Image (tube, rainbow, N blue to C red):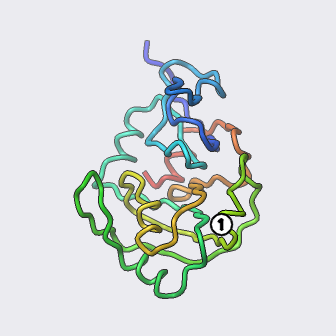
């Protein structure tokens, strides 16, 4: 019997893997949530990244959201070392050259602006002694290469200190606290993801 499609969104915490099993001493999602065995994450966030992650047992959603031909807008709030100037923001918007698995990649056009979000400190927090001057940048991308946001901010000499994915299309993290989970309907998730 085919199981009913299930859809959850979570606020993945810092230092939790985007998989259900633990690995190399790092906790997986299974240490936080008790969900049916056929539910899995759509895409991933790095161990050091936080924010919006979709969990589902809908293989069709996974394919539609992750296929490179279907460019979905993802929004990230990125705390960086220093304060980017207009040239840095222009470079991020026009696309920068990064390396992925040793190959040169020119990022697609993006949107970038300095923001001042009100968000809770991470645990553990960013080292303010090592990084006394920090700022937040909002990046809107339509591609998702491995560690792309971190590589992009490094390319303009403002390394990423903290990274939070806040939305995918119209599906938003909103006020969901770190580690929190909420279930959504198929109708809502497909509409918000513009599928």
Q: Which residue is mark 1?
A: 131
Q: Position of residue 104 (x, y in %)?
A: 24, 63
Picture layout, residue 106 above or below residue 174: below
Q: Quadrant of residue 182?
A: top right
Looking at the image, which residue sits at the far left? 103
Looking at the image, which residue sits at the far top? 1
Taking the image as shown, residue 83 lies to the left or right of residue 125, namely left
- State how many labels appear: 1
44 vs 2, nearest the viewer: 44
Q: Position of residue 142 (x, y in %)?
A: 40, 63
Q: Residue at x 47, y 73 (%)?
A: 157
Picture layout, residue 169 above or below residue 53: below
Q: Residue at x 64, y 52 (%)?
A: 173
The secondary element bearing badge 1 is classed as loop
Picture layout, residue 79 above or below residue 66: below
Question: Which quadrant does the N terminus fall into?
Answer: top left
């Amino acid at each position: 019997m085919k199981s009913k499609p299930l859809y959850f969104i979570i606020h993945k915490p810092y230092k939790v893997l985007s998989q259900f099993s633990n690995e190399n001493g790092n906790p997986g999602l299974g240490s936080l949530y008790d969900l049916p065995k056929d539910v899995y994450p759509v895409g991933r966030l790095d161990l050091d990244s936080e924010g919006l992650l979709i969990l589902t047992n809908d293989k069709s959603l996974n394919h539609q959201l992750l296929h490179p031909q279907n460019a979905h807008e993802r929004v990230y709030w990125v705390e960086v070392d220093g304060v980017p100037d207009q040239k840095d923001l222009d470079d991020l918007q026009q696309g920068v050259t990064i390396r992925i698995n040793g190959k040169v990649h020119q990022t697609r056009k993006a949107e970038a602006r300095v923001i001042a979000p009100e968000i809770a400190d991470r645990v553990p927090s960013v080292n303010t002694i090592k990084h006394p001057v920090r700022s937040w940048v909002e990046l809107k991308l339509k591609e998702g290469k491995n560690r792309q946001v971190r590589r992009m901010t490094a390319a303009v000499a403002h390394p990423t200190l903290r990274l939070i994915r806040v939305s995918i299309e119209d599906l938003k993290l909103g006020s969901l606290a770190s580690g929190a989970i909420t279930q959504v309907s198929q109708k809502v998730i497909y509409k918000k993801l513009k599928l």
